[in-house]
Amino acid sequence: MAVGRGAVMVTLTEREDADELAEQLQEQGYEPCTVHRDMLAGEDDAEDVDWVIEVHTGPHGGPAVFDETHLGLLAEDYGGFATVE
């Protein structure tokens, strides 16, 4: 099984927002909620990176992909978006 397979990637522009949302998701039962930087190919300015919350498992114990719509709506509250990997 490849890393990221079946995961939902919640992408936000601000680290503080990513950390805050990751904490909220963990409180709701999502796991793991790993926050990391994601520099787009071709980007050479370290300030122009996005912050990604990688979520694999939903509070129901199944894959987080089942909650993509919910995660996407939460991401939109922070000006971000969610995609399935």
Image: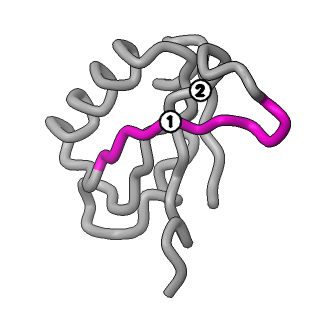
Looking at the image, which residue is at 21% across and 30% down?
Answer: 23
Picture coordinates of residue 31, whole percent (x, y) = 25, 54
**In this view, which residue lies farthest toward the bottom?**
1
In the rendered structure, which amino acid carries the disc numbered 2?
Asp
Which residue is tagged 2?
A: 50
Q: Is residue 21 above or below residue 5?
A: above
The quadrant holding residue 48 is top right
Picture coordinates of residue 44, whole percent (x, y) = 75, 27
Could you tell me which secondary element the residue under label 1 belongs to? strand
Answer yes or no: do the residues labelled 1 and 2 have beta carbons within 8 Å?
yes
Looking at the image, which residue is at 57% across and 32% down?
Answer: 11
In the image shown, does 44 or 17 lie closer to the viewer? 44
In the rendered structure, which amino acid carries the disc numbered 1?
Arg
Which residue is tagged 1?
A: 37
| Residue density around tag 1, few if under 14, some if 14–19, many if 20 or more, within 10 Å | some
Q: Is residue 2 magenta?
A: no
Q: Which residues are magenta?
A: 33-43
The quadrant holding residue 62 is bottom left
